[in-house]
Image (cartoon, rainbow, N blue to C red):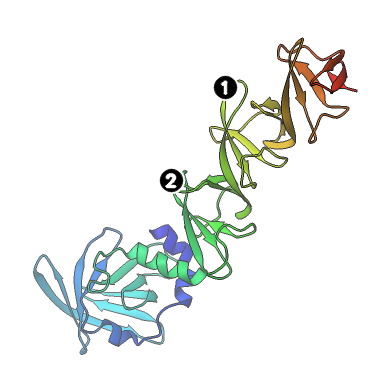
Amino acid sequence: MNQFIVNAATILKSISNNIDFNSLLIGKNWVFVDDKNDDEKYHFHENNELITERDNKKVTSKWNFQKATNNLQINKDEIITYKILFFDKAVVALQKEENNSAFYFLANKAILTDLNIEKHLRDIVYKHLHISIVHVTAGFDLEIHRSYSEETIGANGQTVSLNLAPVKDGFYQSSNSNFIYEIINSKIAHKKHVYKLLLSDGTQANLYSENKTAVVSVGDNIVVNQNPINDGKYFTADTWFIISSGKIQKSGDLIKHKTKNGVLLIEQQGVKQMPGDLAFFENGEPLNSEISIGLFTKIKGVNGKIV
């Protein structure tokens, strides 16, 4: 929790509740929580009397709010001065020293019954910054920053963070949808769909594509076990593609024709076979002759290339 609060400190300071702090404290049942998760009951009274209670033992001491410095002083055996970082009707966040990563909290037990302070503060900050959460398979929540609350979640160019800190470049897959986000410089470069892809050698791969159908196309990413596959040419049952730096640079249909010499495969770059397309038989032998691929269609190959 502390790391999120450290990163959110400036934001929390700017959105504290405008209600009177004294009236906020007095007459409420507060629980004091520190980094040791101690839970001591605090009862603030109008005469600056403070009654603390732990294990059914009550201690009377003093408290004082200094509006000019935004400090809360607690006088037990000694005077402890806290800087008020943030407050609302449910939570008061305190620091002993400004810019110190140690935080202390007062939680209003009547409002925050589960004492889940972190969730309460996250909800406030996320609402203020129009942040939406996407849980990813890496095991954490990806924070997606939007310009306004109705903006589409995961649009290209939106800032992303983890505990309001920058996120490493890479792919982050949603745990409950088939979307994956390509992050570059803590911004969404691409929001892609994830599809299963079986390569001709039996390898199970994933296709990351901005298309809504599992059609292999230029610019898509192919990964195996979340890692980009090596540069080179690859095949599926009906597609060929060339990979460079994890992305598809060229792709096309792999068309099969039954001929008198066996099954002929053509690596088409368009909607039909054209001069320049590669043609070879299933055993790897390149086409070096004229051959019929239908009742009225003949093609000619030289060293495996249609001419």
Q: Residue 71, position in %: x, y?
A: 36, 80
Q: Residue furthest bottom?
A: 47
Give, as a three-letter code, the residue at label 1: Gly
Q: Which of the 4 image quadrants contains residue 5?
A: bottom left
What residue appears at the point 31 percent right and 69 percent down from the top-left corner? 105
Q: Nearer the viewer, residue 293 or 256?
A: 293
**Relative depth, front residue between 206 and 236:** 236
Q: Which mark is residue 202?
A: 1
For mark 1, give the secondary structure.
Answer: loop
Residue 290 or 30: which is nearer the viewer?
Answer: 290
Q: Is residue 298 left or right of residue 50?
A: right
Residue at 25% from the left image edge and 64% from the top image edge? 114
Indicate the quadrant containing the C terminus: top left, top right, bottom left or bottom right.
Answer: top right
Q: Residue at x 57, y 24 (%)?
A: 203
Give the number of the disc on residue 139: 2
Q: Is residue 301 above or below residue 74?
A: above
